């Protein structure tokens, strides 16, 4: 993950934390509801990481396949 992506994720996380505080303060959302929201956000983050990992793996396989095709076509 690039530094730019890390900065964006950190900024997004800070924004979410501010919104959570606002929910608690302005809308009287309970700590239990905030805990559930946090669990859901963590699950989404894990899924994003898994998708990124799968995408990177798939791209590596495509690259290897392309290299193999180029090698075979030269023969």
Image (cartoon, rainbow, N blue to C red):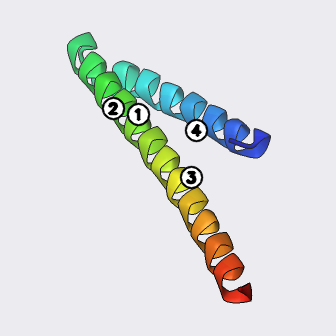
Cα separation between marks 2 and 4: 16 Å
Residue at the spot of label 4: 12
Rendered position, 62 above or below 44: below
**Which of label 1 and label 3 is nearer to you?**
3
Mark positioned earlier in the residue sequence (2 or 4): 4
| x 67%, y 87%: residue | 73
- Nearer the observer: mark 2 or 4; the answer is 2
Q: What residue did someone put label 1 on?
A: 46
Of callouts 1 and 4, the N-terminal one: 4
Local SS, label 3: helix
Residue 56: which disc? Answer: 3
Question: In the rendered image, which quarter is residue 72 located in?
Answer: bottom right
* Front of the two marks 1 and 4: 1
Inter-mark Cα distance, 3 to 2: 20 Å
Residue assigned mark 2: 43
Give me the C-alpha separation between circle 3 and circle 4.
Answer: 23 Å
Image point (24%, 22%), residue name: 36
Which residue is depicted at the point 36% across and 38% down? Answer: 44
**Where does residue 37 sit, x and y in percent of width and height?**
29, 27
Circle 4 SS class: helix
In the rendered image, which quarter contains the C terminus?
bottom right
Image-based side of 52 in relation to 43, left or right:
right
Check the picture and name the quadrant holding the N terminus.
Answer: top right
Query: Mark 2–mark 4 contact, CB under 8 Å?
Result: no
Between marks 3 and 4 in the image, the one whose residue lies nearer the viewer:
3
């Amino acid at each position: 993950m690039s530094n730019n992506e890390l900065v964006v994720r950190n900024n997004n996380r800070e924004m979410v934390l501010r919104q959570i505080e606002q929910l608690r303060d302005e809308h009287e959302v309970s700590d239990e509801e905030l805990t559930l929201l946090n669990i859901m956000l963590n699950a989404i983050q894990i899924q994003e990481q898994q998708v990124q990992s799968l995408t990177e793996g798939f791209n590596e396989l495509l690259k290897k396949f392309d290299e193999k095709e180029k090698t075979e076509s030269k023969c």
